[in-house]
Image: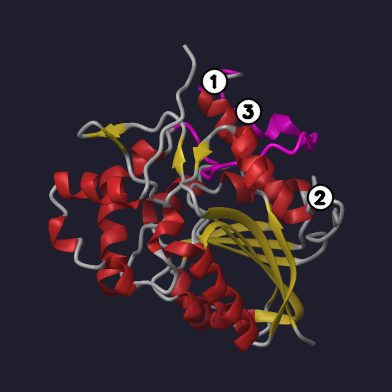
Amino acid sequence: AAVVPLRCGPARWRAALAASGARRWLASPAAHTEVAPEASGATAVGAASVGGQPSPPMRLSAVEPRGPWGRLVHWAYQRFGAQRYPAVVDICNCGVEFGVQLPRPELLARKSIETGSREWRMQMYGAAAYWHMATGAGTPKAHPELFHDKDVLEVACMRGGGARYLAEVAKPRSYVATDNAQEHIDRCNQHPPLDNLKFELVDAMDIGERYPAESFDIILCVQAATMFADIRHFIGSARMVLRPGGRLLLFDVFHRDGLVRVLDTLEDAGMVVEAEVDVSKAVNAAGLCMMPRGMTFLRLVARKLE
């Protein structure tokens, strides 16, 4: 049977949360986040239902939630996160379809995933999003060696399948993948080991305290930054741990006002936006997510000045 795309905008999300006992968290959540909460409006095709509604699109689970919005995200992830992405899937994003051949697709195969299934599409198109972020594949200004021999930090890696894939095919010198949920790190450590890859339990808000200044060439964040409690703090911390000339790469869905805040914050932090690529058509072509009107999926690349 064909998979029917589902929509879950902010109104339905809050309705689902209210029906599930989270009413205490619903008082003006927009007041507690630097990026509009509508940015989380993309929902997975065929997502499980809660009370007759699609499950909300949760991405991030905080170890130490900061503020009411952080606690809301933490609570909702704990309740709905496993339904958002099937347990057999370890690459968790909306995916892209640029018609680009992925290197070594056999690395993405899992014994419990049938070729052609929705879970298989999540793995393949999700990996395509990672490959696009690492190389710009599918765009006129591709940079296939962007990660080559670089020190990479991924923030909010979730189950770590994308990190495991890039650590092998993009050839970074080192790849540190972090998440703030212990259950994610436990899952990450089940991947076949690589000498250049390690997984660590670190909150996105704490990277500036956890890592030395100027210790990474690349910081990557896939479909999580718009859920952070304080995007300004995250960008400032990212700039701190990036080396001069290093790059911050964001793949996310943005509302116009939220995007303006991010771009203004990057400028205030002394970072230059090198690429702002609308990948909404490629996300829609993958068929895993649908976005409400007024939302745009972007690949943002910002460079720290030397």
Q: Mark 1 or mark 3: which is in front?
A: 1
Disc 3 residue type (three-letter): Ala
Q: Is residue 268 left or right of residue 173?
A: left
| Residue 137 in picture, x, y percent from top left | 80, 47
Q: Nearer the viewer, residue 85 or 275?
A: 275
Q: Mark 2 or mark 1: which is in front?
A: 2
Residue under numbered circle 3: 109
Q: Earlier in the sequence, mark 1 or mark 3?
A: 3
Q: Is residue 203 in view? A: yes
Residue under numbered circle 2: 139
Q: Is residue 114 above or below residue 32?
A: above
| Residue at horizontal 55 percent and vertical 83 percent from the top | 236
How many residues crowd mark 3 within 10 Å: few (<14), some (14–19), many (20+)? few
| Residue at horizontal 46 percent and vertical 30 percent from the top | 5
Q: Secondary structure at mark 2?
A: loop
| Residue 94 in picture, x, y percent from top left | 55, 43
How many residues crowd mark 2 within 10 Å: few (<14), some (14–19), many (20+)? few
Q: Is residue 110 left or right of residue 32?
A: right
Q: Mark 3 or mark 2: which is in front?
A: 2
| Residue at horizontal 29 percent and vertical 32 percent from the top | 49
Q: Is residue 30 above or below residue 278?
A: below
